[in-house]
Amino acid sequence: MSDFIIKTQGVCRSFTSGQTVVRALHEVSIEVPRGKLTILRGRSGSGKTTLMNLLGALDKPDSGSIFYDDADIAGLSAPDCDELRRLQMGFVFQSVALIGLMSALENVEFAMRVAGVPAGERAARAQEYLAFVGLQKRLHHRPSELSGGEQQRVAIARAIAHHPKLLFADEPTAELDTHMGLQIVKVFRDLVAHQGLTVIMTTHDPNMVELADVVYTLEDGEVVPQG
């Protein structure tokens, strides 16, 4: 097994908008080390979210290869992609998408049920991960009773409770102030340090980049050399 959980080679992705072909990614080759926090940075439209969707098997490249645990996943069938995401990946998005009628605990338990975690393990594991993100006193609060930062931490607990190898976080701090955003990234750093999780995060905020182990900068769909 290599030191890199994901590698891409010459990945290209384009989209059609009316009569126009938009080149989202062109010849992107990156390596994501295991057990580290890797940040994909860039302005809106730089291609970072498109790249994350490809890495997370949510989309397929037009050309190029994407190796996950040394196996090329670019050609996987839709059911195999679903299975890969369900068992080995977790996702946190800018919009936390918590279920409003469920408490924090119930939101995390529900995600584990979808992932196939045995019923007898769900409650204890949900409490464990909500405590890990600092919400042990907010277990029974619904999303409307939580701050934006607390909602995002519930989303993180939900994304990791089924023990994925890899966590994707797409602009998770975009709707938070800098202080709260740094707290969220500290949770990612703790996951890397104490659980050996690999985290891939997109951002355009320079304040967050300093906390990363590895940074890739995208401009106009290409990875640019670090200065």
Image: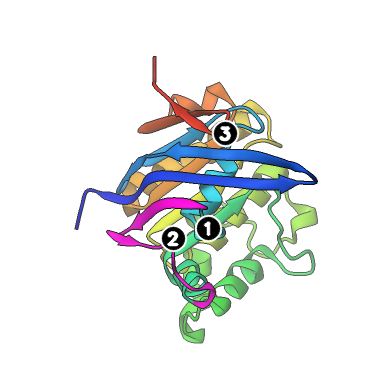
Q: CA distance from mark 3 to mark 2?
A: 24 Å
Neighbours of disc 3 within 10 Å: few (<14), some (14-19), many (20+): many
Q: Nearer the viewer, mark 3 or mark 2?
A: 2
Q: CA distance from mark 3 to mark 1?
A: 22 Å
Q: Position of residue 191 (x, y in %)?
A: 40, 49
Query: Hey, which residue is sitting farthest top in the picture?
Result: 227
Amino acid type shown at disc 1:
Lys
Which contiguous range is marked in magenta? 62-79
Q: Which residue is at a point 55% across and 32% down the rendered structure image?
A: 182
What label sits on residue 100 in the rendered view?
Answer: none
**Which residue appears farthest toward the left when viewing the image?**
1
Q: Nearer the viewer, residue 138 or 120?
A: 120
Q: Which mark is residue 60?
A: 1
Amino acid carrying label 2: it is Ala
Q: Which disc, if any, is residue 74?
A: 2
Secondary structure under the numbered disc 2 in the rendered image: loop
Residue drawn at the location 36% of the way across and 52% of the way down: 197
Label 3 close to label 1 by CB (< 8 Å): no
Query: Badge 1 local density, few (<14 within 10 Å), some, or many (20+)?
Result: many
Answer with mark 3 or mark 1, whichever residue precedes in sequence. Answer: 1
Nearest to the observer: residue 149 or residue 30 = 30
What's the residue type where badge 3 is placed? Thr
Assign a secondary structure to mark 3: strand
Q: Percent position (x, y) of residue 123?
A: 53, 75
- Mark 2 Cα within 10 Å, few/some/many (few <14, many 20+)? many
> For the residues marked 1 and 2, what is the alpha-carbon distance in whole angstroms?
6 Å
Whether tag 1 and tag 2 are in contact, CB under 8 A, the answer is yes
As drawn, the label of residue 203 is 3
